[in-house]
Image (cartoon, rainbow, N blue to C red):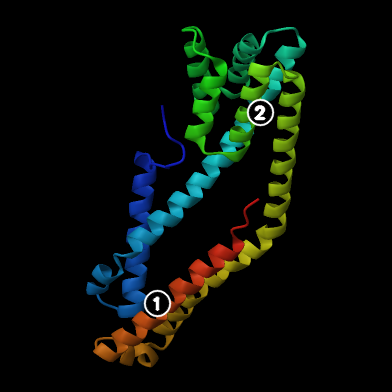
């Protein structure tokens, strides 16, 4: 089964990464060096773009998995209230979940595998632990540990499920509040990220003689490279500041 702690690009995301890299390297080589050879010098940006895109998509995948896991638990809670056993509650919950969200979501596929493995007499707590380890998500890991102890020791499953869904709901709400508060700041930062490129483009088009001494000589290349590295450092620092983890 898939290890979600490591994010792998699909085919479309690979094309997106390559396209972004080509676009950025072309812009950098023209604005900072005005030379096609600048593309070769800007190629290391591929690794930066790849890393940033992978981190963004990985965080997005984790948020979706947490939401889907919470929804799955809520359906299982409903089945438990209706009198189903723990194992059958997950089977019934999966059916209701797929009716609402479809069969292609991550948790639909994972719990479909879990129900199939249970038919082969695999312990539910072992299957849940495997999912938790592969997901690397704190909420699923915590739930699985408590669930395993309660399953072996006869704990109150209804309370465990309800407490877990409530904690996940609270965390999701806090994350949404933070996203709302930070949305304006992130928009400002995106604008600031484009300002250096905008200035170079404007001056290069309206008064190219001001930038001409910076192109076609070693001194100019050195100065532009230092400026580019400073910009990259400021960009990464801003991304780190805006990346608030709960």
Q: Residues within 10 Å of mark 1 (few under 14, many from 20)?
A: some
Q: Is residue 131 left or right of residue 66?
A: left
Pointer 1 or 2: first along the chain: 2
Compared with 161, 44 (above or below) is below
Give the CA separation, mark 1 to mark 2. Answer: 50 Å
User: Quick one: 190 or 59, which is closer to the camera?
Assistant: 59
> What residue does disc 2 label?
146
Res. 179 visible in picture = yes
Question: Which is in the foreground here, disc 1 or disc 2?
Answer: 2
SS for callout 1:
helix
Res. 103 visible in picture = no
Residue 195 image position (x, y, % from top left): 52, 75
Q: Which mark is residue 131?
A: none
> What residue does disc 1 label?
228
Residue 9 image position (x, y, % from top left): 38, 42
Q: Residue at x 70, y 7 (%)?
A: 84
User: Quick one: 239 or 133, which is closer to the camera?
Assistant: 133
Q: Residues within 10 Å of mark 2 (few under 14, many from 20)?
A: some
Residue 64 image position (x, y, % from top left): 58, 37
């Amino acid at each position: 089964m898939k290890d979600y702690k490591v994010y792998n690009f699909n085919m479309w995301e690979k094309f997106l990464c390559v396209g972004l890299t080509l676009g950025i390297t072309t812009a950098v080589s023209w604005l900072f060096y005005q030379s096609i050879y600048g593309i070769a010098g800007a190629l290391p940006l591929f690794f930066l773009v790849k890393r940033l895109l992978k981190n963004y998509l990985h965080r997005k995948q984790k948020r979706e998995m947490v939401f889907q896991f919470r929804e799955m638990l809520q359906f299982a809670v409903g089945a438990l209230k209706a009198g189903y056993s723990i194992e059958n509650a997950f089977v019934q919950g999966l059916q209701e979940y797929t009716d609402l969200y479809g069969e292609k979501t991550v948790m639909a596929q994972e719990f479909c595998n879990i129900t199939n493995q249970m038919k082969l007499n695999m312990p539910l707590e072992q299957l849940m632990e495997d999912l938790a380890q592969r997901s690397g998500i704190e909420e699923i890991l915590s739930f699985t540990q408590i669930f395993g102890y309660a399953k072996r020791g006869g704990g109150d499953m209804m309370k465990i499920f309800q407490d877990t869904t409530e904690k996940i709901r609270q965390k999701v709400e806090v994350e949404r509040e933070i996203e709302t508060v930070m949305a304006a700041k992130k928009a400002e930062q995106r604008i600031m990220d484009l300002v250096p490129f905008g200035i170079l483009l404007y001056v290069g088009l309206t008064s190219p003689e001001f930038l001409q001494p910076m192109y076609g000589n070693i001194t100019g290349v050195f100065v532009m490279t230092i400026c580019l590295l400073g910009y990259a450092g400021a960009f990464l620092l801003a991304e780190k500041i805006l990346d608030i983890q709960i």
